[in-house]
Image (tube, rainbow, N blue to C red):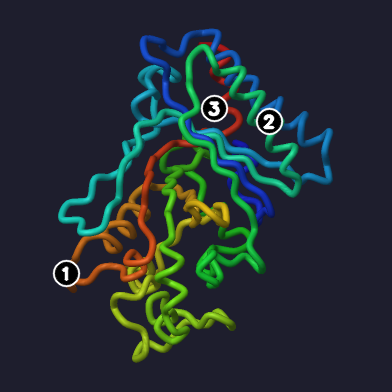
Amino acid sequence: MTTPQSGILPAASSNGLFMLFRRRLGRRADQTCRQILAAWPDRIAKLAGQNPDARFVASLGFGADVWPEIYGNEKPTQLRAFPRICGAIHPAPSTQCDLMLHLRGERYDVLFECAEQFTRDMVEWFDPIETVQGFRYRDQRDLTGFVDGTENPQDEERAAVALVGSEDPHWAGGSYLHIQRYVHRMESWNKLPVKQQEAVIGRTKDSDEELPDDDKPLTAHISRVVIEKNGEELQILRQSLPYGSPSGDKGLYFTSYCKTPDIFEQMLARMVSPTADGRVDHLLNFSRAVTGAAFFVPSIEALQRLAAK
């Protein structure tokens, strides 16, 4: 049996902290770095145990470029960089980064403490290049006013969707993580009548019901990201949160976990590039991606294996 990192499967949290790190110029992850990473699950468990009311959970992922320095030649079968989408007419940038720290919980002070400690521990090898604080907005809504994550799997399906299994047994319990930070054009969005907003999303705003097929444009967000194969809907586990300030950038920090990177890549392609039907996602007229990165989040046991390297 393998144990997934605690930040992958639990239900949505009220607070999130998203940190991207890049390897320092001229530095390589060495045995000391690997020892620190191997001990990280125990430190997460200790901090969570000391603050049970925080419901603190965490995930740590590694990008394809830095992977050989951490694990050598052994790697997950589908590990690869963030996709470059051919023919994209909306931006889907790829951010040069190597580590992703994703923290969630009900108390932001615990997330801050953990992030500060990790940053200190990694300072010799990795520099933080982006830190974003996320927050729950109303009843799990995006800043657009629509519920986010409606299509998420529930109960035991969450693990079936998010975690690598017997198809790659050495990395079972791990997950492929994709992130994108979206900046919303809220002034333009708020000028749209609700009916037009609903056509852009493909769901009703207040009751969060999917529009009937006859009323749902092929350019609606739901139409682009809901994909069926052999009669089954392809799923990812979203752990996104809104972020921002009243006077500055604001939007959604998109975060997804899955047992394969294929599904995210298919969804992104249908959003930003005209496919067989010639359409793209009209939500991207009101929200643009400014970052994008892909990681693998190893199981706790796989992290602990680093102690022997």
Above-or-below relation of 129 to 149: above
Above-or-below relation of 55 to 208: above
Residue furthest front as drawn: 247
* Residue 81 numbered mark, or none: none
The structure residue drawn at horizontal position 49% and vertical position 50%, both measured from the top left corner, is 255
Q: Quadrant of residue 207?
A: bottom right
The residue wearing badge 3 is 302
Whole-angstrom CA distance, mark 1 to mark 3, is 40 Å
The residue wearing badge 1 is 276
Do we see residue 239 in this rendering?
A: no
Whole-angstrom CA distance, mark 1 to mark 2, is 46 Å
Q: Earlier in the sequence, mark 1 or mark 2?
A: 2
Q: Position of residue 36 (x, y in %)?
A: 60, 16
Secondary structure of residue under mark 3: helix
Q: Earlier in the sequence, mark 1 or mark 3?
A: 1
The structure residue drawn at horizontal position 39% and vertical position 28%, both measured from the top left corner, is 75
Whole-angstrom CA distance, mark 2 to mark 3, is 21 Å
The residue wearing badge 2 is 114
Which quadrant of the figure contains the N terminus? Answer: top right
The residue nearer to you, when weighing 184 against 5, is 184
Side of 41 relative to 204 (left or right): right
Above-or-below relation of 50 to 12: above
Amino acid type at circle 3 is Ala
Q: Position of residue 286 (x, y in %)?
A: 37, 66
The residue nearer to you, when weighing 303 against 214, is 214
